[in-house]
Amino acid sequence: MNVPELIAAARGGSVRAAGRLLSLVEGPRRGEVLDVLGPAAARVVGVTGPPGAGKSTTVAALVGAYREGGARVAVLAVDPSSPYSGGALLGDRIRMADAAADPGVLIRSLATRGHLRGLATAVPAPVRLLAALGHDPVIVETVGVGQSEIEIAAVADPVVVVLAPGAGDAVQAAKAGLLEVADILVVNKADRDGAERTVRELRAETRAPVLTLVAPKGEGLPRLVEAIEAHDRADDPVRRAGRARAQILSLAQSRLRGHPALAELAADVAAGRIDAYAAAEDLLRRPLGGAG
């Protein structure tokens, strides 16, 4: 099928067509697909946190809540290395098996390897595609390693940070910068020892809402959904423009990184023939050509 036929099939409920389109927007035919789609926007809920905190279980619970309300939901599970690496990523997806069997839910693993600044350059195109196919919200889950926890703030609002009780998670989250990007903090596995202490520690460190959750049982889920909805209602043009600015700059930097003149200019700077300031001005003046 050509792109318009794939879009029509995906809008008609074809998971295979949607998967093919997602593969296209992750590759060199991205522009072709986006041109046919036209403008589209969706709510993007980010879910991140350290390994073992229960992010996938939390996402599965959120998917169930949104599906009960009749929404078509998409989940982008971000892998900073490769969509074919398996391992922990696929193990986490198994916990969403029930959601994956629902025709109103689309779950996709997304690679960020090769994308400068990862999420901010890899995610916008799939999100726009999924929005145009009728998925709202789109939940972006990171695997909890590398810089993806911080980068998620450029593409998602709100960012839900999931932590587990005890083990110094609150302190580690602060050190990792997670508290700076968290719009909502969730202490999952709240039926375990140490949950109340972790909540107190977090509330002493941040002004973001701190909620408790026992994801497999759905305990605390309505409050989490309400917090997400309240945050969405409070969104404004200034915040949306800030996220858009971060995405534009990341995409522009990614394209400049592949500029055909970059190697030549770098060699000139290294040899002392020109300075880095002049080289940067020169690079911005030159046409990109096939870069990007």
Image: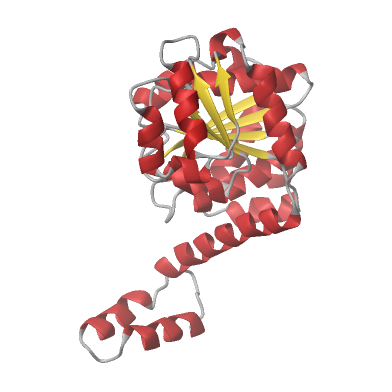
Residue 6 visible within the image: no
Q: Which of 100 and 51 is in front in this view?
A: 51
Q: Where is residue 256 in the image (x, y as percent from the top left)?
A: 45, 70
Q: Nearer the viewer, residue 241 or 119?
A: 241
Give the position of the N terminus as an image quadrant: top right
Q: Where is residue 179 in the image (x, y as percent from the top left)?
A: 48, 41
Report the label total.
0
Q: Position of residue 154 (x, y in %)?
A: 55, 51
Question: Which residue occupies 71% across, 23% down?
Answer: 66
Question: Which residue occupies 63% across, 43% down?
Answer: 157
Indicate the quadrant where residue 140 lies: top right
Horizontal side of 278 relative to 77 (left or right) equals left
Indicate the quadrant where residue 11 lies: top right
Q: Which residue is most to the bottom? A: 273
The coloring applied to the image is secondary structure
Q: Where is residue 50 in the image (x, y as percent from the top left)?
A: 40, 30
Q: Nearer the viewer, residue 84 or 183?
A: 183
Question: Which residue occupies 52% across, 61% down?
Answer: 251
Question: Which residue occupies 36% across, 42% down?
Answer: 175
Q: Is residue 277 above or below residue 231?
A: below
Indicate the quadrant where residue 231 lies: top right
Q: Is residue 17 above or below residue 249?
A: above
Residue 205 visible within the image: yes
Q: Which residue is most to the left? A: 271
